[in-house]
Amino acid sequence: KAGVTQTPRYLIKTRGQQVTLSCSPISGHRSVSWYQQTPGQGLQFLFEYFSETQRNKGNFPGRFSGRQFSNSRSEMNVSTLELGDSALYLCASSLAGKGAGELFFGEGSRLTVL
Amino acid sequence: TQLLEQSPQFLSIQEGENLTVYCNSSSVFSSLQWYRQEPGEGPVLLVTVVTCGEVKKLKRLTFQFGDARKDSSLHITAAQPGDTGLYLCAGAPSNTGKLIFGQGTTLQVKP
């Protein structure tokens, strides 16, 4: 069965721009979580969506937002990009929809902000 | 402040050596997970430990959950170059529903 698909895989933006990343979870998975991964901070939790509702949120500024559609696909948006937003953004889906369930990760979207 | 502290952060060893990676916290977790991430890929779940003092083995990898549910360890016996990667521990603090990760241990096994 198909895994978690993230698009685009790579993108370059400049400061002040905005970006939208997309994630298609494994079929049947209703929970989608987003993480930011950087060499200095590791994997940082952004937010989790379950059945189109944001269920958990990490400690990121309001420039980071997301949503989930009725087919469980999810998008995250970062507005007014800063240099520090350069990172690998990982999406993960899970079946159980609970925090301790197994997460299945996509390959990530690598964002570079110039 | 990292809720889950991993040590060491970097480890470079020769093929055939043994190693242990630690994951510690001051918080209690109902379970802890270990993931491995290879370059260009997302993390992949290796194991979930749930019971106090639980020991789980996955071929040459041995995972243990601490008695107080605040720590876990990963021991690799006779490491091989294929074990190279980033090892991450993860857990959901008792009063939240979100899975958080340690900063990871980068392991390099040289042939």
Image (spheres, coloured by chain):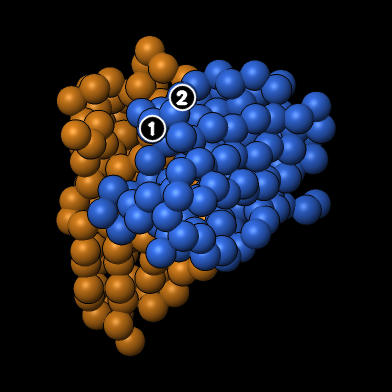
A95 versus B17 height, above or below: above
- Residue B71 versus residue A15: which sits nearer the camera? A15
**Quarter of the rendering occupied by the C terminus of chain B:** bottom left
User: Disc 2 vs disc 1: which is toward the camera?
Assistant: 1
- Judging from the image, what secondary structure is the residue with disc 2 in? strand
Tell which of A10 and B33 is nearer to you.
A10
- Residue topped by disc 1: A60
Position of residue A72 in the picture relative to residue B2 (left or right): right
Relative to B9, residue A98 above or below: above
Q: Chain of mark 2?
A: A
Residue B92 is situated, as x and y percent measured from the top left of the image, at 41, 26
Report the residue at 39% width, 31% height from top: A61
Q: Amino acid at mark 1?
A: Phe
Q: Nearer the viewer, residue B86 or B55?
A: B86
Give x and y (percent) for residue A52.
Answer: 70, 22
- State the CA–CA distance, disc 2 to disc 1: 8 Å
Q: Residue furthest bottom?
A: B111
Chain name for mark 1 = A
**Does residue A64 sit above or below A38 in this rendering?**
above
Q: Residues within 10 Å of mark 2 (few under 14, many from 20)?
A: some
Q: Does residue B106 appear in the picture of this structure?
A: yes
- Residue B9 horizontal side relative to residue B76, left or right: left
Give x and y (percent) for residue A8. 65, 59
Note the chain letter of the blue one.
A
Image marks 2 and 1: residues in contact by CB distance under 8 Å: yes
What amino acid is labelled 2 in the image? Lys
Q: How far from the left and from the top, in percent, is residue A93?
A: 63, 38
Q: Colour of chain B?
A: orange
Element at label 1: loop
Label 1 Cα neighbours within 10 Å, binned few <14 / some 14-19 / many ≥20? few
Residue picked out by circle 2: A57
